[in-house]
Amino acid sequence: MYRGLFRKPKNTLEIRDGEMELSRPHIADDAYMKCPDCGRTLYVQDVQDNLDLCPDCGHHFKMKVRRRVEMIADEGTFTELTLKSKNRARAENPIDFPEYEEKLAAAARKSGENEGVLCGTAKIGGLDTCLFVMDMDFMMGSMGTVVGERLTGLFEYAVNRRLPVVGYTVSGGARMQEGILSLMQMAKVSGAVKRHSDAGLLYVVVLTDPTTGGVTASFAMEGDVILAEPGALIGFAGPRVIEQTILQKLPPGFQRAELLLKKGFVDDIVPRKEQKHYLTNLLGLHSDRITI
Amino acid sequence: MEAEKFRAYQRVEAARAKGRPTGRDYIENLISDFTEFHGDRRFGDDKAIVAGIGRLKNMPVTVIAMDKGRTTKEKVGNNFGSPHPEGYRKALRQMKLAEKFHRPVLCIVDTSGAYPGIGAEERGQGQAIAENLMEMMTLKTPIISLFIGEGGSGGALALAVADRIYMMENAVYSVISPEGCASILWKDAKRMKEAAECLKLTAQDLKELGVADRVISEPEEFKAGSRQAKRVYYTLEDLLYEEFQWAKQRPVEQLLEERYQRFRKF
């Protein structure tokens, strides 16, 4: 009842409909964001101009696939690989899963892409390579038949052209809506990675936040060199599933890149700003063959 | 009415039913002179996976079986058939030996999934499964995987990159459990029956999708040690023997190319 006691009484002359709105500076809802690590409020543009890193603490935010390609590939060298094979260019609904078409359409709108991975060829530091980048905005980067087909196609192409493969993973795992067929992609892609490996070719994978489930249990863990972005969540089972199984809270830092490094499951943690240089060096070290 | 509508989930229940033969039951009935080997040489011995060698009729074979356990004590000891990374690594070690000594490999699959726990994650559950997928694809000896109950996602696939997939009539094989699927999709694990229907996880569905090559009929009452079960084992013994005989005669490059294409087609 005391609210407004000390305020100047309003009258209709002072405040008209909508005026309050207009007199405030306009702030778009998406102009600011909060850093989950340091808690700072950040201007979105600043983050975007900084490779999606927090300008204060360096927290690695998720990155759009095309921006990732721009960051890694030499300018103008990326060519997307399109699939020749039959009907796998776009996702269908192979097991008639309810509401799957709607989900695909929504994912396409959200991501601006037509599936959960972008595959192509590019130069990195002047060296030819095959490149794949998974897309978190497309149904959590889940792996269905199209993602599996594109990746398999990429590795097979790399074998034929004797090229290395550089890949960025981000995934919630297998795509439930494609049932067992999504599980089969794990075996299919692994087979292609094995052939690429047996051909003596290099596969470097960079695990980004989050990489889980069937992707971790297949090509994410099959690289000759496995790198990770700082702080990335990497695991087979998701943290919630583990907590529900063991009925305990997980310790802080569990399944993070830093712990995986300590346990021996990744070769190195490479901050985003250093990745291009790091990959250039790696590709270079593998391209100069000593012939005896 | 209800039963008609949710036939897939009835299979799931049958696959999980108490008294259903376990991995060890199959070994005891199909394989003579079985010798079990333990351990992955890296961390420990995972009792969720039984591995060893024996004879199928007169043929030396390597057998790798997930075993949920029969008694409560066994079940707890075997972690209810959910393997840790060391289980998959033990399996791979035995497969490599099978390759070295030209023995065919029989994998028996029965798991609700690879174990989601702290130790399992810290020791690289994902890496262990991934390595099996890669290595099995080019293992230079015939592999048959027999699904006897639950085939839970990546944890099952890690023993199922094979030349042939056989499924018992009431076995299921799925990317996610019906309960898990329902809780993610509809935030309601109780709608598992609908989810089971959507996932196409029954042996018959999987045969139609080309994931399974053969469905083995089960008797009405399929209990370990029953006379009806014996008849199933006899049938299986003949089928597996013939399949291995046939596969062993194939040139190894052809066998591996066919294995690659078997998964490439999906």
Image (tube, coloured by chain):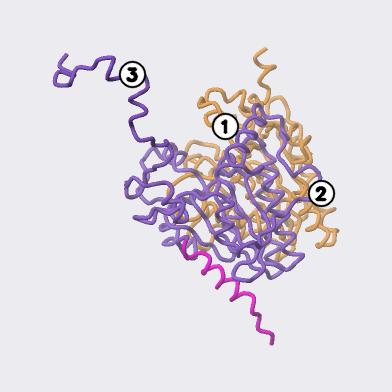
Chain colours: A purple, B orange
Residue type for callout 2: Glu
Residue designated by label 3:
A16
Residue type for callout 1: Cys
Residue A137 forms part of the magenta stretch: no
**Which quadrant of the view contains residue B98?**
bottom right
Look at 28% across and 16% down and name the residue there: A13
Badges 1 and 2, same chain: yes
Q: Which segment did they paint magenta?
A: A273-292
Report helix, strand or loop for mark 3: loop
Residue designated by label 2:
B243
Q: Chain of mark 2?
A: B
Q: Hey, which residue is sitting farthest front in the picture? A: A13
Look at 57% across and 55% down and name the residue there: A220
Residue designated by label 1:
B181
User: Disc 3 versus disc 2: distance between alpha carbons?
Assistant: 86 Å
The picture places residue A173, in percent across and down from the top left corner, at 57, 44
Question: So how many labels did they put on this image?
Answer: 3
Q: Are marks 3 and 2 in contact (CB under 8 Å)?
A: no
